[in-house]
Image (tube, rainbow, N blue to C red):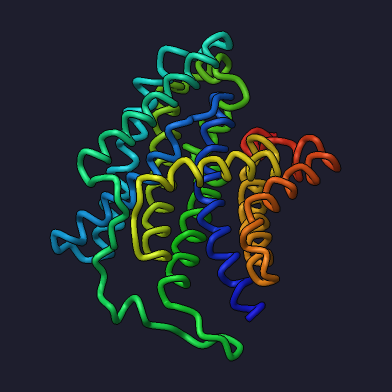
Amino acid sequence: MLFEQLINGIVVGSMYALIAQGYTLVFGVLDKLNFAHGEVFMLGGFICLSLVAFGAPLSVAIVVTALVSGLVGVVVEFVGFRKFTSDDGYVTAALSSFVIGLIIIDLSHKAWGTEPLSLPVSEALQNASVTVLGTKILLTRLMVLVVAFLVMLALHLVVTRTKLGRQIRAAAESPTNATLLGINVIRVNQIVFFIASVMAGVAGVAMALRTGYVSSDVGFTFALKALAIIAIGGLGDLRGALIGGLLVGVVEALAFAFGLGQLVEMFVWLFMIVVLLVRPSGLFGSTIIRETRA
């Protein structure tokens, strides 16, 4: 039972980490938080649901959802952040992205309604399981775990091993200097939003696979926890977002395992407070995007 709960915690934590790393990527480059990020996560689940309902294979639906979510992120960057790049535009950009999130929620209500919808996947897939150390684990949860870590691994390789990653790190260090070096900072910002929103969309699909349904209410809840996670891991640190997400997922799982499920939200925030009391800058407390350049 405890092992099963730990697996569940790691699965949920991997989804938290996907969302938190998207937040972190944008914050690391622009020093601004994208408050529409949670709604892109929510939208990803609905897009995947619609594609599967129209007969698309799940694998195709996941790829298309990721691409569409990325394009939504580019729109968010253009509308909510492009004109507010200076320090005094921080609040304006935050409010703008928050309003965009509200618009996405309203559009989702008009398109799919306000009630949760079931993800139309086969019962065989929903009930398929594998046995690990004597414990049956649903195959969909293992799929979520594998997809989440593959996406995060891809992000790590892009940031640390590619020319694009060097441009992202340069833009994060100093947009002015990056421009002088011939880097198109606007294009880098667009790509960063695209990648972050792809991760959010994939996380939305993962959520739908794990729970079997999609709801317009999940975006705010997961986005709020993602903010706690990046505070735990350290603002702007991709490693911190990963470790923080997994830790929060495990904390929640342990709360359920010991019969404290009703207090799970409180434990998450208490965990954040304890971490910040010990390390005010978070577990890592520096930006891996900027550190890697050195």
Up-down relation of residue 293 to residue 32 (above or below): below
- Residue pictured at 65% horizontal, 33% vertical: 290
Q: Camera-side residue: 260 or 4?
A: 260
Up-down relation of residue 196 to residue 139 (above or below): above
Q: Position of residue 175 (x, y in %)?
A: 55, 18
Up-down relation of residue 143 to residue 220 (above or below): below
**In terms of image quadrants, where is residue 176?**
top right
**In terms of image quadrants, where is residue 129?**
bottom left
- Residue pictured at 55% horizontal, 49% vertical: 156
Q: Quadrant of the N terminus?
A: bottom right
Q: Quadrant of the C terminus?
A: top right
The residue furthest right is: 278
Viewed as shown, does residue 148 lie left or right of 53? Answer: right
Q: Camera-side residue: 130 or 78?
A: 130
Q: Position of residue 142 (x, y in %)?
A: 47, 72
- Residue pictured at 65% horizontal, 48% vertical: 239
Q: Camera-side residue: 94 or 110?
A: 110
Viewed as shown, does residue 128 lie left or right of 276? Answer: left
Q: Camera-side residue: 2 or 229?
A: 2
Viewed as shown, does residue 74 lie left or right of 138? Answer: left
Q: Position of residue 73 (x, y in %)?
A: 36, 34
**In terms of image quadrants, where is residue 126?**
bottom left
The residue furthest front is: 262
The residue furthest top is: 88
Up-down relation of residue 208 to residue 199 (above or below): below
- Residue pictured at 48% horizontal, 31% vertical: 35
Q: Position of residue 99 (x, y in %)?
A: 39, 24
Label total for image: 0
